[in-house]
Amino acid sequence: MLKELKPAFVLLVLMTLITGVLYPALVTGLAKVLFPSQANGSLIVQDGKAVGSALIGQPFSDPKHFWARASGTSPYPDNASASSGTNQGPTNPALAEAVAGRVKALREADPGNTAPVPVDLVTASGSGLDPHISPAAAEYQVARVAKARGLDAARVRALVAESTEGRQLGFLGEPRVNVLKLNLALDAPEKK
């Protein structure tokens, strides 16, 4: 029996070293050399301090800021350690109630806005951590943000245009706006 166990044990140790130590170390090392920002969490640094990640949504509720997508994480929104969607299907009454509540909150925050509410402002993404909104969702919020900041809507709209990222490689995905980056641009002293 030891004769059969010895090769199995040696193979277990060898594969553990290869797949559990060497391969991850190689991939991590290559990532840090080839993609240093992404390998370190795509952190956004301002005044020498990390203020967030370009890859993880942040909750904003101040009318002076653009609001991100709803988050399905718990126990609090945009909890990066609990990435998950709500897993509520389109016929689930809980989803309909949540969407109606989010629409109501958006309407109350900007009562003069009668435009249709973009779907990405009232639904969570699959991970619950999406840092982006659509350009339509950003446009929906321009008047509220401009009014709350005492800025011309055209200036806020120009910041949205500057912050809009195109499709990856020119054809993958949809244009999008990173909410944290946009709000940081709004908060920058030279933008006011």
Image (tube, grey):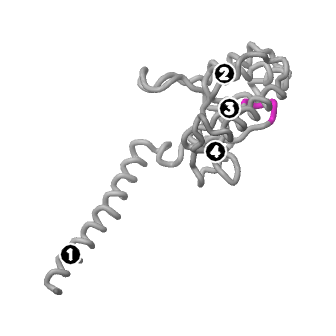
Residue that label 2 marks: 160
Magenta highlight range? 62-66
Residue that label 1 marks: 8
Q: How crowded is mark 3: few (under 14 residues within 10 Å), some or many (20 or more)?
A: many
Is residue 180 shown above or below 136? below
Residue depicted at x 20% and y 75%: 8
- Is the Cβ of the residue at disc 4 closer than 8 Å to that at disc 2? no
Compared across the picture, whether 97 is left or right of 5 comes to right
Residue that label 3 marks: 122
Residue 161 on the magenta segment? no
Label 4 vs 1, first from the N-terminus: 1
Is residue 129 shown above or below 135? below
Residue depicted at x 68% and y 35%: 96
Residue 64 on the magenta segment? yes
Type of amino acid under label 1: Ala
Q: Position of residue 172 (x, y in %)?
A: 43, 25
Label 4 vs 3, first from the N-terminus: 4
Residue that label 4 marks: 72
Asked which secondary structure carries label 3, the reply is loop
Type of amino acid under label 2: Val
Label 3 vs 2, first from the N-terminus: 3
Q: How far apart are marks 3 and 1 (CA)?
A: 54 Å
Q: How far apart are marks 4 and 3 (CA)?
A: 11 Å
Type of amino acid under label 3: Val
* Residue 48 visible in image: no
Q: How far apart are marks 2 and 1 (CA)?
A: 59 Å
The answer to which image quadrant residue 120 occupies is top right
